[in-house]
Image (cartoon, rainbow, N blue to C red):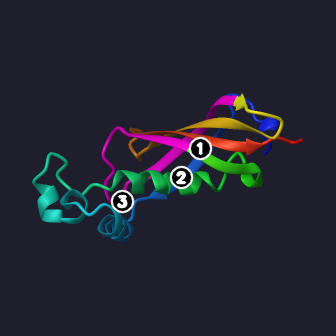
Amino acid sequence: MYFDELKLGMTVDIAPTVIEKEKMMAFARDDDNIPLHTDEDYAKNTHFGDLIAPGVMSFMSVWAKYLEVDFFGEDLLAGKSTKIEWLKPVFVNDVLTGKATITNLEKRNAKNGIAEIFIEAYNQNGELVLTNITEAVVKCKN
């Protein structure tokens, strides 16, 4: 969708994604290799009581589902920035769902503008586990 067609407050629902243990462990070993994500005995003795998913992995799992319904499609020119906040731990077999909302639109020139997307992700208990603000450069119709 072109920048000119976007409206503040537009939303899309993000389909559920399951945090699978094998994928979580592989991601953690490769990209966030700390005991809280990879060592079950260690994790059981923390205040979490179990392994928790790496925050970036949790976000990317939600982001992958967002991309299935994303606002921009082929009219996306580039990402500009992203800010993730982790509010609650995500555990193995948690089911994350979410919603994406356009929260700001700023036309830069005749060719493109910046669209801000706010993503909120919830676990299967309805608890908000993370939020994200991403800015994207989107082309204009002209």
Residue assigned mark 1: 80
Q: Residues within 10 Å of mark 2 (few under 14, many from 20)?
A: some
Q: Residues within 10 Å of mark 3 (few under 14, many from 20)?
A: some
Please tell me in which quadrant of the rendered image residue 122 appears: top left
In the rendered picture of this protein, how many numbered marks are placed on residues?
Answer: 3
Tell me which numbered mark, 2 or 1, is placed earlier along the sequence: 2
Q: Is residue 123 left or right of residue 51?
A: right
Is 90 in the magenta? yes
Does 97 sit above or below residue 126? below
Local secondary structure at mark 3: loop
Residue in the image at 41% along x and 57% along y: 57
Residue assigned mark 3: 93
**In the image, which residues are magenta?**
81-105
Please tell me in which quadrant of the rendered image residue 137 appears: top right
- Identify the image quadrant of the C terminus: top right
- The residue nearer to you, when weighing 37 against 137, is 137
Residue assigned mark 2: 63
